[in-house]
Each structure stands twice: as C-alpha cells, then as structure tokens.
Image (cartoon, rainbow, N blue to C red):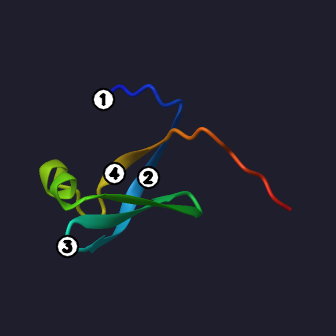
Amino acid sequence: MKLSARNQLQGQVVRITEGQAMAEVVVKVGNLEFVSAITEGSVKAMEVKIGDAVTVAIKATDVIVGK
C-alpha cells in the first residue's frame, strides 16, 4: 500500500469500539495509542481485528505544540 502521507507508523490494533455507523480503532505504537474513527464498513471490508498489524498514516495541516 502506498500513501502520500509522510508520517506513517507501524502498530498493533488493541481495541475496536463499534457504534451504529462508525467504529473507534485504537492502535498501539510503542508507548503511544492512536485513535481513529472509521466507518463500520471499512472495519469489515479490511477485516480489521484486535492484534492485527496495521499502518497509522497521519496527514494533518497543523501540528500544535503546547507547554
């Protein structure tokens, strides 16, 4: 799979919370957890399951740093 996003991280699915139309997929990358809201249809079409190795791609227009 090739993506234009430069920020790609390899991780493992640790939790999937399904709703009526959307699912929250939590991916652990090192000590961090990334949360993505995707459609239930995408979860089913990609056959995403807990324990799967996946790629997290981050494409943002802003990166905010606070202290």
Question: What number is the disc on residue 11?
Answer: 2
Determine which residue is flagged by label 4: 53
Which residue is found at the position 22% from the left and 56% from the top?
48
Assess whether mark 4 and mark 3 are in contact (beta carbons under 8 angstroms). no
First of labels 3, 4 by sequence position:
3
Q: Earlier in the sequence, mark 1 or mark 3?
A: 1
Which image quadrant is residue 41 in? bottom left
* Local SS, label 2: strand
Q: Secondary structure at mark 4?
A: strand
- Separation of marks 2 and 4 at Cα, in angstroms: 6 Å
From the viewer's perspective, is the residue at label 3 or at label 4 nearer?
3
Secondary-structure class at tag 1:
loop
Residue identified by numbered label 3:
20
Q: Please name whichever residue, 16 or 40, is drawn nearer the observer in this view of the structure.
A: 40
Looking at the rendered structure, which numbered label has been put on residue 1?
A: 1
Q: CA distance from mark 3 to mark 4?
A: 25 Å
Mark 1 burial class by Cα count in 10 Å: few <14, some 14-19, many 20+: few
C-alpha distance separating marks 1 and 2 = 15 Å
Total marks placed: 4
